[in-house]
Amino acid sequence: MASLCAPRFRSVCLGPSTGAQQLRASQSLLAVLVYALFAVVQHAEVVAGLVDFQASLWLTGFFMTGALGFYAVIRSGLNERLGSDPSLTLPQMVLGVLSTVGSYLITGPARGAVMSLMVLILVFGMFALRPRQARWLSVFACALLALAMVWKGATDPLQYPPAVEAVHLLFAIIIVAAVGTLTARMAAIRARMRGQKADLEHALEQIRLLATRDELTGLSNRRHMNELMAIEKARQRRTGQPMSVALLDIDFFKRINDTYGHGGGDLVLKTFAQLTRDGLRSTDVMGRWGGEEFLLMLPDTSAADAAQCVERMRSQLARLSADAIAPGLRVTFSAGVAEVGGLDELETAIEHADQAMYRAKVKGRNCTVVAGTLVA
């Protein structure tokens, strides 16, 4: 069996989240439709003689070009590489503010209705902006509206009376400040919920690790090993490939504990776990079966190949210096290997491996014994 016990690597090609990208594209398309409806209403104002045709044409060209540009960027996936916000929420909202103020400048008598668009724009960012961005956008919108009102009041006082513009500005400040504050609070709540979600995910991951991993060695625990072997056994029945199991028991572990204390024993277990884990393929699984006993599962591996793998591990461990625990200490293990046939039960294979391991200890320890292929 080629490259037995050598790590296997597989390349994984990760692309952008298709579902999230489609949702962002749908939202951007919705924005395009809203701008299109806005253009229709604005054209109706032109027909009614409320808005200059050339001014309407320029403004429509501006916001429709911007909206379609954002949609094209998001639809192409380029937005994934442009920054931390793939939805491009803030730039889209800046476009909306500029378009709304532009509409206010040309709409004349019906300009009061344009103020509702500003609210719509700010609400659009309520579930995406950060608190600082929401505050900045509110200030930007109020300042731009104020400049527009002052300029029109000074240059066209007949259609934009200064007193009326002052009232409009006060209402705009109240509305934008209220919506901006609400948006900032929603953003803060979202940030807190993201933090809580991250903490919860971390806690769940710790619980999962505690449920599947041995705390001392970091290897799979007995319950998790049983689950993994059951999955592999089901796969083996479909493919017909062999599978082997091996039981490894550290020699004279009780003597190590008695001589060097539980701290020394724990260090031996950790060292053993690290050494064996580094020498396995990605498909192989080592678990702590109990005490100083470990179970190794080797999919697609015959008993003879499994024995070669275990022998290499045993030789490496025997050569490893354990002077960090005690000068001159050498750690070895005895192992039993059994192959699981197509109709065999896992319990039977593990029992045969256990018997082979016992024979290895009888033979003098620090060796590997193969039980042979099991027959149903």
Image (tube, rainbow, N blue to C red):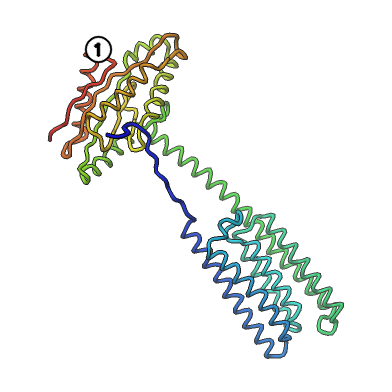
Camera-side residue: 171 or 54?
54
Compared with residue 229, is residue 133 higher up or lower down, i.e. above or below? below
Provide the secondary structure element on which disc 1 rests.
loop
Which kind of residue does numbered mark 1 sit on? Gly
Quadrant of the image containing the C terminus: top left
The residue carrying pointer 1 sits among few (fewer than 14), some (14 to 19) or many (20 or more) residues within 10 Å by Cα, namely: few
Q: Position of residue 267 (x, y in %)?
A: 43, 19
Q: Position of residue 244 (x, y in %)?
A: 24, 32
Identify whether 367 is placed above or below 124. above
In the image, what residue occupies the spot 55% across and 71% down? 30
As drawn, 157 above or below 146: below
Residue 355: horizontal and vertical position, in percent?
A: 20, 22
Judging depth in this view, the residue of 352 and 82 nearest the camera is: 82
Tag 1 residue: 364
Of the 4 image quadrants, the one containing the N terminus is: top left
Query: To which quarter of the image does residue 207 belong?
Result: top left
Q: Residue at x 25, y 44 (%)?
A: 235
Location of residue 263 in the rendering, given as x and y in whole percent from the top left corner: 45, 16
In the drawing, does residue 18 fall left or right of residue 37?
left
Residue placed at 30% from the left, 34% from the top? 2
Q: Is residue 188 left or right of residue 172?
A: left
Residue furthest to the front in view is 2
Question: Most extreme residue toward the bottom, as rendered?
Answer: 48
The answer to whether 113 is drawn above or below residue 18 in the figure is below
Q: How many marks?
A: 1
Which quadrant would residue 256 be assigned to in this image? top left
